[in-house]
Structures are given as structure tokens and as C-alpha cells.
Amino acid sequence: MSSLPKEKNLDNLFKAVLQLKTIDECYDFFDDLCTTKELHSISQRLHVAKLLTENKVYNKIVEETGASTATISRVKRTIEKGNNAYEMVFERLGSDDK
């Protein structure tokens, strides 16, 4: 279970994301919602998580993603002690995430 506190604004954000039907809609919505830097950071963490689940070593992950070792460590802790959401998403994506 998520450690995020339940709140109306987060519920509305998540409901809005669930309404998106295409990659183009996602690009448009997130372009309006986030800065390029914020989106880069989020997508980088997802990429780091994928590489960690593939048992890649830190120096290869740094090389491939440009993420700091602090970011990699944080993502690793989340994979180990989080909600298993990365695993769920990667399972659902299957080979589409490559």
C-alpha cells in the first residue's frame, strides 16, 4: 500500500492520467503539466528501475542513463522496499518497454 497520503488533488491527477488514451495525448498533457526537466527526471528514474531489475551494475546504469549514483540508490531502495509498482508496470508493458 502506498505511503502517499490520500488527498483530493492527487486523486484528481491520477484520474486525469487514467483518461489518457494515446502516447500523443500523454505528450500533450505532460507537456502542459510538467517542465521538460521534471519529465526527464521521472523518465530517467523509470529507465534506472528497468536496468536495476535487469541486474545491471551501477556504472553501466550511470553510463546509459546519466543518472547520479544517489538517484540509482534511491530507485534501488524503492524497488526493494516500495509497493512493487515498478515490477507491476514492467510486467504489464512486456516487450513494449524495450
Image (tube, grey):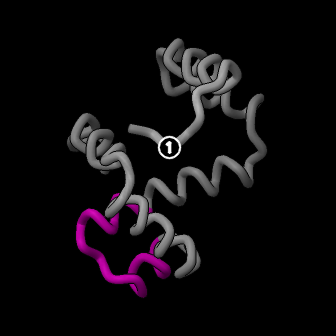
The secondary structure type at the circle numbered 1 is loop
Magenta stretch bounds: 48-64
Label 1: few (<14), some (14–19) or many (≥20) C-alpha neighbours in 10 Å: few
In this view of the protein, which residue sits in the foreground, 13 or 29? 13
- Direction from residue 26 to residue 83 in the image, left or right: left
**Residue 12 position (above or below residue 3):** above
**Residue 36 position (above or below residue 62):** above
- Report the number of discs: 1
Q: Quadrant of the N terminus?
A: top left
Q: Residue furthest bottom?
A: 59
Residue 2 in picture, x, y percent from top left:
45, 39
Q: Amino acid at mark 1?
A: Ser
Residue depicted at x 72% and y 33%:
31
Q: Is residue 65 magenta?
A: no
Residue 87 in picture, x, y percent from top left:
27, 48
Residue 60 in picture, x, y percent from top left:
39, 82
Residue 6 in picture, x, y percent from top left:
58, 27
Q: Provide the residue designation for mark 1.
A: 3
Residue depicted at x 50% and y 27%:
23
Residue depicted at x 38% and y 53%:
82
**Residue 91 position (above or below residue 53):** above
Residue depicted at x 50% and y 68%:
74
The prevailing secondary structure element of the residues shown in magenta is: helix
In this view of the protein, which residue sits in the foreground, 56 or 77? 77
**Residue 80 position (above or below residue 20):** below
